[in-house]
Amino acid sequence: MLRIVLFLVLIALAGAGAAWVADQPGNVVMTWGAYRASPSIPVFVLLVGLFAVAVVLVWSILTMLWRAPGRLRRRRHEKRHARGRHAITQGLLAIGHGDTSLARRHADTARRLAANDPLALLLHAQSAQLEGNRDEAQRVFRAMAEREDTRLLGLRGLFIEAQRADDAVGAVMIAEEAIKLSPSSTWASHAVLGFRCARGDWSGALAILDSNLSAGLIDKAAYRRQRGVLLTARALELETMDRDVARESVMEAIKLAPTLVPAAVLAAKFESEAHQVRRAMKLVEAAWLANPHPDLAEAYAHVKLGDSARQRLQRVETLAAKISADKPGHVEGQLAIARAAIDASEFARARAVLAPYVNDPTQRVALLMAEIERTEHGDGGRARAWTLRAVRARHDPAWTADGYVSDRWRPVSPVTGRLDAFQWQTPVASLPSDRSTTIDSSAFEEAMLAAPPPKRVTSAPSESPAEPVVTATAPVPAAQDNSPPEAKETAKETAKDVAREEPVIVPAEPIESSPVAAESSPAAATPVFRTRADLGKPAQAPIQAVIPIIRAPDDPGIDDEGPSDEFTEQIGTPKAQAGGWRGFWSRWGA
């Protein structure tokens, strides 16, 4: 609407101006040599207007002709660049769905049409990576690293290629150069931090962590936690070399990360050595409530030097009582009580604590039960049975990071280089699956555990000695190699002990039964070969020298009806048994 009004106003002004010029009287005299002209004012104004229009037209034509070559070149360049961008787009899409030949073709087209485009270089490098041509990819990434606009991207590509070639030193050097160009580069700071932690350069790692905080890569809470992890790692390394620096580091770490288990254990140790028992107990209790761990229970038990085993047991019971039975860490408290009770020779207390877990024990529970049997009664057989159960038992929680299970805490994951990656949890590979389809192969251990503790057996010799019967024990099925080292060593020693045991001839006790049963079993007083471990077991019924044939669970075996092949030709007709009186007499005739 405003434009229409302005247009009408301009028309009105132009009309008013034309009317004013037309109303002006007089002439304009122009003399040029012998030529003389005297047009009126309106005619003169009209001639001036036409001359101006002609000049503008001529100037426009001349300018267009002068600029035509440049416009043609620019238009051709834009068309070429558009084709190059189209090739880049199609090539990146081809890389996305893994078409190597199409990506290479589009990369060649983009390099020919848009050689200076950064995306063309990126497409060329990624197509070379997709083909597995590492030399070509490194050459392109070096070219990108020399340019100002693609330098960081080229360094990133060279870093990836160095990692693929297992060149850790070269990768770290590239990452350090990238940090100099851009301190906020996440991948570079992560790589340099992991390398310095792996090398044990904790001061350099702390400097990188401070740089990450100033660059805004991590927040304040993550910075405090990670700094506590690095300080704890430095304290653990310097514990035997420079105890003053180690103590200073771990005390700062426990303030930054009070729930970090290694920091709490080491800080409690230093406080205990300084006779600050109450402060040490508070440090352990704070970490225990957040993450119950056996090392914390051990540190809490020995927080006061010179205490007896019973005093340590009472202290561990106090620590375990701080976690209720409905919390996940309750089992760690019970295992800690059992450990302290065994050390204090309170075997009944240890058995009572472990009773809820013996039906489905973990490896630690089975090993503790084996130690109880060996220490309390000296029962090597039952101890070996529990050790064999530990071989096949469920795994206990362990320090795990990115699928890697470590026997100790580490500040950085060896798989990804991630800081503070280790967590105290059950490894994923050892989590139980559908237990309904699991074949129970612990019959031997159950039989050994069902026997009472050993007692000294004395029996009179038999009146009429008979030939001894040798009994064979079914072999124990092989277990998977998922047990701790101490369980494996104990199992090997058990096998050697069983192999070394000499048979001892002990007459078996007669079976109390009816006279008919006694008459029908003449071997009731037959002596049986029994090992020394079986001396304390009550005599059982004599076992005949018969080894039953038992099919394995995955072995179909042989059909009882005999082989039957549909392609086998039967010779003759099978003879049917006669019925009636003939069949009756045929059964008695032989």
Image: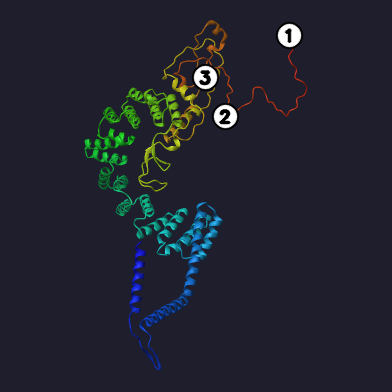
Q: Position of residue 308 (x, y in %)?
A: 26, 29
User: Which residue is situated farthest in the bottom direction here?
Assistant: 34
Report, in whole angstroms, how far the alpha carbon at label 2 lies from the one at label 3: 33 Å
Task: Decide which of 318, 454 is in the foreground and name it.
Answer: 318
Instruction: Identify the element where label 1 is drawn.
Output: helix
Eye-nearest disc, 3 or 1: 1
- Within 10 Å of disc 2 (Cα), the crowding (few <14, some 14-19, many 20+) is few
- Within 10 Å of disc 3 (Cα), the crowding (few <14, some 14-19, many 20+) is some
Task: Decide which of 548, 504 is in the foreground and name it.
Answer: 548
- Residue 37 vertical placement versus 438 (above, below): below
Q: Is residue 523 visible?
A: yes
What's under tag 2, amino acid-wise? Asp
What's under tag 1, amino acid-wise? Gly
Q: Name the residue tied to disc 1.
A: 580
Task: Decide which of 564, 312 is in the foreground and name it.
Answer: 564
Q: CB atoms at circles 3 and 1 under 8 Å apart?
A: no
